[in-house]
Amino acid sequence: MEEPVPLPLAINDSFDDDKTIKCKMCSVEFLDDQQLGTHWMENHKKEAQRLFRGYACAICLDSFINKKVLESHVQERHHVQFVEQCMLLRCISCGSHFGNTEELWLHVLSTHPVDFRLSKIAQQHNPSAAEEPPLKLELGNSASLENNSENVGSVQKFICRFCGLKFDLLPDLGRHHQAAHMGPSLASSRPPKKGVRYYAYKLKSGRLSHPRFKKGLGAVSYRIRNRATATMKKRLQASKLIDTEIISAEPHVMENSNLGRLAEPQCSALAKILFSRTHKTKPRPNNLDILSIARSSCCKVSLKASLEEKYGMLPECLYLKAAKLCSEHNVQVEWHQEKFVCINGCKPAKDPDFLSPLIPLPNGFEGHQSADSLDDADEELELDECHYIINSQHFKKGPMQKANILCDDLSFGKESVPVACVVDEGLFDSVYISGLSSNEQNARSSTPWENFIYVTNSSLDQSLDLDVESVQLGCTCSNSTCFPETCDHVYLFDNDYEDARDIFGKPMRGRFPYDDKGRIILEEGYLVYECNRKCSCNIACPNRVLQKGVRVKLEVFKTENKFCPLTLLHVDLQGWGVRAGEPILSGTFVCEYVGEILGEQEANNRLTRYGRDGCNYMFNIGSQINDMSRLIEGQARYFIDASKYGNVSRFINHSCSPNLVNHQVLVDSMDCHRAHIGLYASQDISVGEELTFDYRYELLPGQGYPCQCGASTCRGRLY
Ligand SMILES: C[S@@+](CC[C@H](N)C(=O)[O-])C[C@H]1O[C@@H](n2cnc3c(N)ncnc32)[C@H](O)[C@@H]1O
């Protein structure tokens, strides 16, 4: 905190000459503002700096009076070591930003010359309040803080623009801001919403002036609008509580004493968050760690002891994961089986869960031999964090029979991981191989890659009648990878869904939808805001996942009963499905549902053409979002038809107990019609396991096709 500028106390009232301009500091007279400005630069530069030179963070545009405070801000919030790398100068008088001092002074001299004059003279010449030099100028460096009513005498206060609390010292305001308005679980301390734009402005305090953000804000507001209204009451009620309990009616008249009451619980909440984060950073064993310890363990007791010695308490069922890893990497172990007795005499643990019976591995269980079976095991494990599989289903033998490869890659290089098309041995006879059949129609049905055009991006059908131009928001992060604390996409998400939870029930506030391994942690039903072409971050940014495309090995395979009536015409009784060509961990992005995006009318026309109950490749966003109350009201209803244009997702069958979930992901546009449909693993999926999602077909009772998903909870028909 710098001292207030000492202002001349005595003002000579004899200056009645209306042409005379007097220096505010020393009362020397000048003929024009230019001369006065030069005088200030030569004689009162230090004071000019105190009066006009503020600082702003170039990353988030938060403003500061003191460079040191900015320095700690950029280090702590943006992890930038040197303040010069992201420092802007800010005109305290009007809030404009500049890259260097010269630009700032040019601006001050040309825009605020009146601020150099002795105010008494100004008053004499023009008593109207509107043209009075800003009172803040007379009150030293509290100028940037908006309090007109209380800046009297020499006492200055720093006022929080969110809630109106006043502070004597800027660092106190900074600490309050951090604790009261930036903590992930402290949303309720925010002031009532007065509209999305107002709220956004308040929340980011100054970001509105950032051109990128400003532009995008208007674009998103239409989506936010409904939801904002719906939650307004709730927020108002919550904030009223705070108002009555802590804050007197007018935020501007609050006293510092309130800070103690406000800050204390918040500080402890913050401390709790930090505490739990400390815990979370404890090293966890990755697959490689588990495998290497599992290799040398004589039994699960010794495995558990060795792992816990290194990594602390771990889930009891971790041995299942270890055994699975061993089997996947051809390490023969038996200790996971029931009744196994350790030859070294290790005592079994008393915990009954620890000894839960397991289905033994089938004889001859081996890694799946598919088109690309030569995995780099180490590489695969490197990618894989410790992930606990507690379901013996993972040892179940999938369709592991020898598979015949019909096509190495039915995307023909369009995906970064080849998508093989295979037929298991038992079903091979029923397949017509292209070229072998005399009947071309029949042959077509057995070469599924010829029935559609493989594309990796959806296209918009004209029936949708959308503006060609779509609006997208870039975040203001300047790093190559974004941090959730500062990324605008996290902010937008939080603004849309203030109570969003992750799959473990924890609040999503202040977090990316993906964890650090790129797996989705967000509950189904929320929009995902990924970083995009307008952001400065690169593809390694943790907030870019779907847009990287298919990264897991998938196989299109012949099923026994999920056939397509359309292909029935082609004497092909067995439809296709998609299965995992490698283990897929829960939360992993599998693929996007790609096709032609249609409006309701066109979709209905096509459905009639295809035959409503028959095979169709239509993904109905409407029916998906109907089930999910979390989605924003008025959200777009549209269809994606993958009949003619599509990708591997068009072969994914329905299950009433699916292992994939879908999320609407905003990548290239904030327009929900242009949202991508991402399919993500909702559980760990083993090699060879069929991938399925819930079609949620909108059909009337009696309509629909008999479902063959085989789930114990099967609804019976495909709807
Ligand atoms: C998007 S396609 C899936 C791929 C399709 N099996 C094929 O061979 O091209 C959807 C169609 O597959 C069939 N299908 C999908 N899931 C099914 C299930 N659980 N039971 C029966 N048929 C299913 C239905 O004919 C459905 O209309």
Image: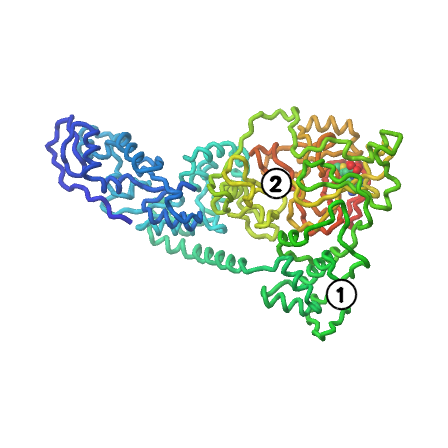
Mark sitting on residue 521: none
Q: Gap between marks 2 and 1, in whole Å?
A: 39 Å
Q: Quadrant of ligand 1?
A: top right
Label 1 environment density (alpha carbons within 10 Å; few <14, some 14–19, many ≥20): some
Numbered label attached to residue 334: 1
**Nearer the N terminus, badge 2 or badge 1?**
1
Residue 548: assigned label: 2
Above or below: residue 171 compared with residue 441: below
Q: Position of residue 692 (x, y in %)?
A: 73, 44
Q: Is residue 224 left or right of residue 696?
A: left
Up the image or down, 267 lies above or below 52; here it is below
Residue 718 seen in the figure: no
The three-letter amino acid code for the residue at tag 1 is: Glu
The residue at 36%/36% (across/down) is 97
Q: Report whether the residue tagged 2 is closer than 8 Å to ligand 1.
A: no
Identify the residue shown where x is 23% and y is 42%: 46
